[in-house]
Amino acid sequence: MAGNTYGTLFKLMTFGESHGPAIGGILEGCPAGLTLNLEAIQGELERRKPGQSAIVTQRKEPDTVEFFSGIFEGKTTGTPIGFAIHNTNQKSKDYSHIKDSYRPSHADKTYDDKYGFRDYRGGGRSSARETASRVVAGAIAKQFLAPVQIRAYVSQVGSLIMDKPYQELDLSKTESNPVRCPDPEMAGKMEAYIRDVRKEGDTIGGVVSCVIRNVPKGLGEPVFDKLHAELGKAMLSINAVKGFEYGSGFAGVQMKGSEHNDSFSQDGTTKTNYSGGIQGGISNGEDIYFKVAFKPVATLIQSYETIDKEGNAVTVQGKGRHDPCVVPRAVPIVEAMAALVLADFRLRNEGAKL
């Protein structure tokens, strides 16, 4: 299987399956001498781990990361950073009922069609559990990027939309509720809705918004490696993502050019930021902001019609421990992938100092 590596200089390769012994990764390209806050890295995993609230999957995993290389006396050595997160709470029997059938809108059939074989336990390599490895690498990237600040939050669950611009939000409140919405009133509505959807054995989608501040100018490599193109690729590589927009996004098509253009102040900054901090594929020093749309989780805890390997129609009863809405746990994943993109472009600008 190809396609397990992201990045050009700041490069992550991940490995492992949902119900295997462990998942993990190898991060190469991180410069030597970076003092790492290992507790902060573990803290990022705590934000993504299962079982953290009543509105996410109740799989109980400590998600403790163990480092094997690339760090000595609390600092990076410049060599590949190897790490693993052991799986300790697998219930593979929960998936025996889909051994010979395909769950709708999952990777089950496409994996079988492509490889002629699949790990049906929790989706194997296609499981969103793989993203825990991205969070570890992204946490390291965040520390490398300081003082760049990357803050994501939930802005929509189903039809419940928090449409306040990010400038009006207190993003420090994002972690104050299980939904990770910085608006307390809307967070309460979202949480209640997710609970109701869960009781029905159903799922719902949502949107994660992200704001990146203190971005240096000059990140991005036109023509094909534009900064927003790489951000889009990174976000669309996350499980369940169906859409990405940055800056004014699709709403910008309703504006005239005279309204949409970001005119300059004499100090070189822009008076508005419909461009989302990126012009010509290169960061201009303004805030980068974007949205990521997540579909409803495909696994339903209810009966559904599908087919088996022979193409026969079958009825399957959903089982297992699954998120009724993925967006609360997706917040640190979005931040991690954004950090990996920016770290890679920073090294492309500076050259790898190994």
Image: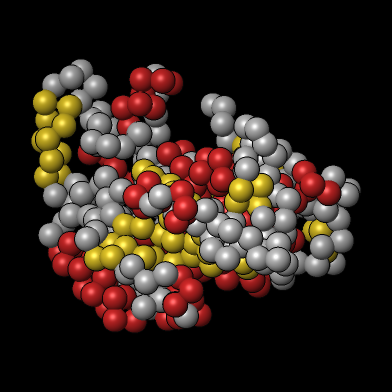
Q: Is residue 345 left or right of residue 337?
A: right
Would residue 304 be visible to someone looking at this image?
yes
Would residue 130 be visible to someone looking at this image?
no
Find residue 1 and report its image quarter.
top right
Find residue 137 and report its image quarter.
bottom right
Rendered location of residue 348, percent (x, y): 77, 44
Rendered location of residue 91, percent (x, y): 35, 51
Q: Is residue 26 left or right of residue 314?
A: right
Instruction: Say above or below: 222 vs 193.
Output: above
Q: Residue at x 61, y 48 (%)?
A: 279
Viewer-nearest residue: 307 or 337: 337
Q: Residue at x 17, y 27 (%)?
A: 307
Viewer-nearest residue: 162 or 217: 217
Q: How many marks?
A: 0
Rendered location of residue 105, percent (x, y): 27, 37
Viewer-nearest residue: 278 or 9: 278
Instruction: Say above or below: 151 vs 184.
Output: above
Q: Is residue 240 left or right of residue 185?
A: right
Q: Residue at x 58, y 65 (%)?
A: 271
Rendered location of residue 23, percent (x, y): 55, 48
Find residue 39 and report its image quarter.
bottom right
Q: Residue at x 80, y 67 (%)?
A: 35
Instruction: Say above or below: 329 vs 177.
Output: above
Q: Is residue 308 left or right of residue 177?
A: left
